Amino acid sequence: MGQTKCNVLSIAPDGPAIVRVNLFVRSIATISDIKMEYSVQLTFREQWLDERLKFNDFGGRIKYLTLTEANRVWMPDLFFSNEKEGHFHNIIMPNVYIRIFPYGSVLYSIRISLTLSCPMNLKLYPLDRQVCSLRMASYGWTTDDLVFLWKEGDPVQVVKNLHLPRFTLEKFLTDYCNSKTNTGEYSCLKVDLLFKREFSYYLIQIYIPCCMLVIVSWVSFWLDQGAVPARVSLGVTTLLTMATQTSGINASLPPVSYTKAIDVWTGVCLTFVFGALLEFALVNYASRSDMHRENMKKQRQRQCELEHAASMDATSDLMDTDSNATFAMKPLVRHPGEPMSLDKVRQCEIHMQPDRPNCCRSWLSKFPTRSKRIDVISRITFPLVFALFNVIYWSTYLFREDGEES
């Protein structure tokens, strides 16, 4: 006897065929940021009523019939709209079965592995949450002929103790996503999986090493300003290490057009390391300027001493040659343009009002050279500014994460 293949849609008199769907998520293998995709293995089930398949159960002795070939009965033309790759499992036998019940109900179950696209918003990376969808729709039958509905009561199940390396599955939501095209409206189901990124990995691998590199660059402020090789090698080494760390982070992410949270962190840390290197260049320039100023001061002092000695010699010679000469008395009133004597200047300074004490100025007066002052100011300024940046950074992105979640 020949076998009949039922490939015609059975439509109920009062409306379209209803197909109820439920899923069992067995595992989620990988979630790729750079490819924006994730891999999932699931057991897919759908159930519908086909009155042409009714049979006699012989008084309840036959519960159902089992088939392993899907082409024996009519099947809904469901497809995964955001699928990139997918395959069935055939080890040891094909992981698929079809159960036909006496009243014509058909249950189709199959185990499949899928790689699905997951567009991600990485503005808060790595403090972000991502929503990855699983979409199922009818390919050829419109809603006038075929409608997909979620099975009532827990339509999506997830295996217990689901472990992901860098994410945590917080929750999942079921919804409908019917689409309208030029050829009609098509039924669609979707599951939204909400993943939270595990921050501890990035704290250990990115944030703490970057903080350590920035702090190591500050060691240059405590070295002697004359230790040029040590300070230059320290600044260049930390700068190159920070640049390598930044390039390694960007290599594991897609090239997006917006600024990510990790870009702000690495950019500011790189700026602090580069600023420490520029600070040494400024200190070196100020040190050479201080040396030049000190040499000019010593030269002027030596010249004044020579002029003073020469004037003293001339005065003594004059007194020896003409001891009986009369000297004219200097006027009490100083004419304009006439320089004041040193005694009068000192007398004026005594009557001048003293300046008010300034704590910062008095503290900086302990360091006579400008180069030393720059180092001392940098020891305080750099840590304070970096601590202020940390407060702004963590408060901004943590609160923004909570706001976007709500």
Image (cartoon, rainbow, N blue to C red):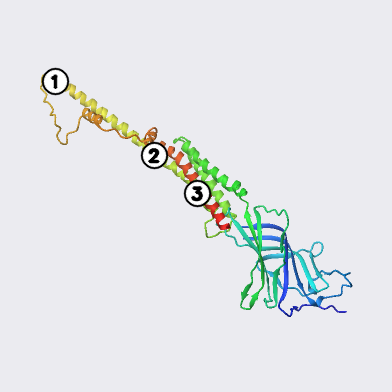
Q: Residue at x 17, y 22 (%)?
A: 317
Q: Position of residue 176 (x, y in %)?
A: 65, 68
Q: In front of the other: label 2 or label 1?
A: 2
Give amino acid for label 1.
Answer: Thr
Q: Quadrant of the N terminus?
A: bottom right
Q: Residue at x 23, y 27 (%)?
A: 308
Q: Nearer the viewer, residue 141 or 40?
A: 141
Circle 1 sits in a helix, a strand or a loop, which is it? Answer: helix
Circle 2 sits in a helix, a strand or a loop, which is it? Answer: helix
Q: How many numbered discs sit on the rendered protein? A: 3
Q: Which residue is mark 2?
A: 286
Give amino acid for label 2.
Answer: Ala
Q: Residue at x 14, y 34 (%)?
A: 335
Q: Nearer the viewer, residue 39 or 237?
A: 39
| Label 3 or label 2, whichever comes before in sequence order | 2
Where residue 65 sits, quadrant-wise, is bottom right
Q: In front of the other: label 1 or label 3?
A: 3
Give amino acid for label 3.
Answer: Ile
Gap between marks 2 and 1, in whole Å? 52 Å
Q: Residue at x 69, y 57 (%)?
A: 29
Mark number, residue 321? 1
Mark number, residue 392? 3
In the rendered view, tell whether residue 292 sits above or below residue 257. above
Mark 3 packing: few (<14 Cα in 10 Å), some, or many (20+)? few
Circle 3 sits in a helix, a strand or a loop, which is it? Answer: helix
In the rendered view, tell whether residue 339 sits above or below residue 10. above
Q: Position of residue 236 (x, y in %)?
A: 50, 44
Q: Position of residue 371 (x, y in %)?
A: 40, 37
Q: Quadrant of the C terminus?
A: bottom right
Q: Position of residue 212 (x, y in %)?
A: 55, 42
